[in-house]
Image (cartoon, rainbow, N blue to C red):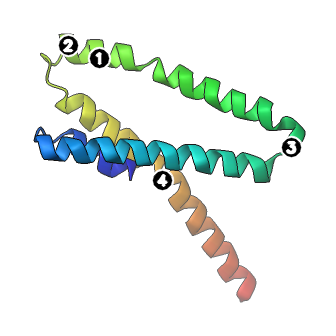
């Protein structure tokens, strides 16, 4: 979903930008709800607030990178965000490597235990 959002941001057509807005909203809602569900299952209830707050602080620190990225687009790329969007798409696709690796690792371990 977020990869689709990143791809849609690179297309400068207004109807596609409406789709980008919808993908942004649903992606954020999905990610935050998954985070809360994971923290609820993975940590004891007495630590939920601390761990959730830590996750939000980390997200806020990453969000602080928006301004330098905006400045980079303004100064280096002559107000053309294509290369910044391409960089973000690459980083987003790199983040998919961990779930794919975990799936491969679990499938390999399951196969070894069956034989």
- Residue drawn at (30%, 41%), measured in percent from left and top? 21
Residue 97 tag number: 4
How packed mark 2 is, by other alpha carbons closer than 10 Å (few <14, some 14-19, many 20 or more), is: few
Q: Earlier in the sequence, mark 4 or mark 3?
A: 3
Q: CA distance from mark 3 to mark 2?
A: 45 Å
Q: Secondary structure at mark 2?
A: helix
Which numbered mark, 3 or 1, is in the foreground of this view? 3
- Note whether residue 94 is visible: no
Q: CA distance from mark 4 to mark 1?
A: 27 Å
Quadrant in the picture for the C terminus: bottom right
Residue that mark 3 sits on: 45
Q: Is 23 situated left or right of 51 in this image?
A: left
Which numbered mark, 4 or 1, is in the foreground of this view? 1
Q: Earlier in the sequence, mark 3 or mark 2?
A: 3
Residue 70 tag number: 1
Q: Are marks 4 and 2 in contact (CB under 8 Å)?
A: no
Q: Secondary structure at mark 4?
A: helix
Q: Is 102 situated left or right of 85 in this image?
A: right
- Residue drawn at (47%, 46%), measured in percent from left and top? 95
- Note whether residue 26 is visible: yes
- The answer to whether residue 62 is above or below residue 38 is above
Q: Position of residue 98 (x, y in %)?
A: 54, 52
Q: Are marks 1 and 2 in contact (CB under 8 Å)?
A: yes
Residue 74 tag number: 2
Which numbered mark, 4 or 2, is in the foreground of this view? 2
């Amino acid at each position: 979903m977020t990869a689709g959002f990143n791809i849609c941001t690179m297309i400068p057509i207004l109807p596609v930008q409406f789709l980008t807005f919808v993908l942004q909203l649903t992606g954020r809602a999905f990610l935050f709800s998954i985070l809360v569900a994971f923290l609820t299952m993975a940590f004891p209830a007495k630590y939920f607030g601390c761990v959730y707050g830590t996750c939000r602080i980390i997200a806020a620190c990453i969000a602080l990178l928006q301004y330098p990225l905006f400045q980079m687009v303004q100064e280096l790329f002559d107000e053309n965000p294509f290369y910044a969007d391409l960089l973000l798409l690459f980083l987003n696709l790199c983040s998919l490597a961990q779930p794919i690796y975990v799936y491969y690792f679990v499938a390999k371990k399951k196969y070894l235990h069956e034989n």
